[in-house]
Image (tube, rainbow, N blue to C red):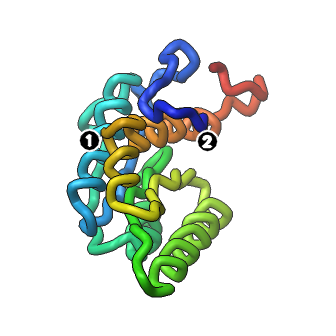
């Protein structure tokens, strides 16, 4: 789905999300970015048929804590997909590398260990402006793109094993 407009999607190609339950775990770090990503994700889930009652959102202090928040959400909620929303901006130290690598590997591990898809919606940019551009700015909103991925993955999770097809 990589495009220059992260907000574009063709609703005709997406399953109806009415019967799915979604989790969203959001980093409180860089809230002007993460809250815009969350807003885009929620609006898209609703546009695709999800109900407000079937969207659960938790905040965690930073992007590194997303993995634990997602794990606890998987263990305590009955969900069809989770969107992990965060933002890490390159600084002058290796902290950026360690956080990005840890969060990426942690989300991979959750996807392997549990039967709930966790969508990676963590912006890892060189500058704050790049993050702003991807969270509702000139390039659209990555939260929208990740919500579409969550709907599609929820459909795969709930795949009708008798037909072997996803149905979208």
Front disc: 2 or 1: 1
Q: Give the class, few, some or many, for how many residues have Cα within 10 Å of label 1's Cα (few <14, many ≥20).
A: some
The mark found on residue 165 in the picture is none
Direction top: furthest residue: 12
Above or below residue 76? Residue 51 is above
Locate the C terminus by quadrant: top right
Near-viewer residue (139 or 148): 139
Residue 65: x and y in percent read 38, 75
The mark found on residue 157 in the picture is 2
Locate the N terminus by quadrant: top right
Q: N-terminal of the two: label 2 or label 1?
A: 1
Q: Residue at x 38, y 39 (%)?
A: 141
Q: Residue at x 45, y 84 (%)?
A: 95
Q: Which residue is mark 1?
A: 39
Q: Residue at x 58, y 40 (%)?
A: 153
Q: Give the class, few, some or many, for how many residues have Cα within 10 Å of label 2's Cα (few <14, many ≥20).
A: some
Can you see residue 110? yes
Asked which secondary structure carries label 2, the reply is helix
Can you see residue 76? no
Q: Quadrant of residue 55?
A: top left
Does residue 135 appear to the left or right of 154 in the view shown?
Answer: left
Circles 2 and 1: CB atoms closer than 8 Å? no
């Amino acid at each position: 789905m990589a495009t220059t407009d992260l907000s574009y999607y063709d609703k005709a190609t997406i399953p109806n999300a009415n019967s799915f339950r979604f989790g969203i775990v959001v980093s409180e770090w860089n809230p002007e970015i993460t809250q815009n990503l969350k807003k885009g994700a929620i609006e898209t889930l609703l546009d695709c048929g999800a109900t407000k009652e079937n969207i659960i959102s938790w905040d965690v202090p930073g992007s590194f804590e997303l993995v634990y928040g997602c794990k606890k959400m998987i263990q305590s909620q009955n969900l069809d997909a989770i969107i992990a929303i965060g933002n890490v901006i390159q600084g002058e130290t290796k902290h950026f590398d360690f956080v990005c690598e840890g969060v990426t590997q942690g989300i991979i591990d959750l996807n392997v260990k549990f039967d709930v898809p966790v969508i990676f919606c963590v912006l890892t940019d060189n500058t704050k402006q790049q993050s702003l551009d991807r969270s509702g700015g000139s390039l659209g909103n990555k939260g929208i793109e990740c919500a579409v991925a969550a709907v599609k993955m929820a459909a795969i999770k709930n795949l009708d094993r008798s037909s072997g097809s996803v149905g979208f």
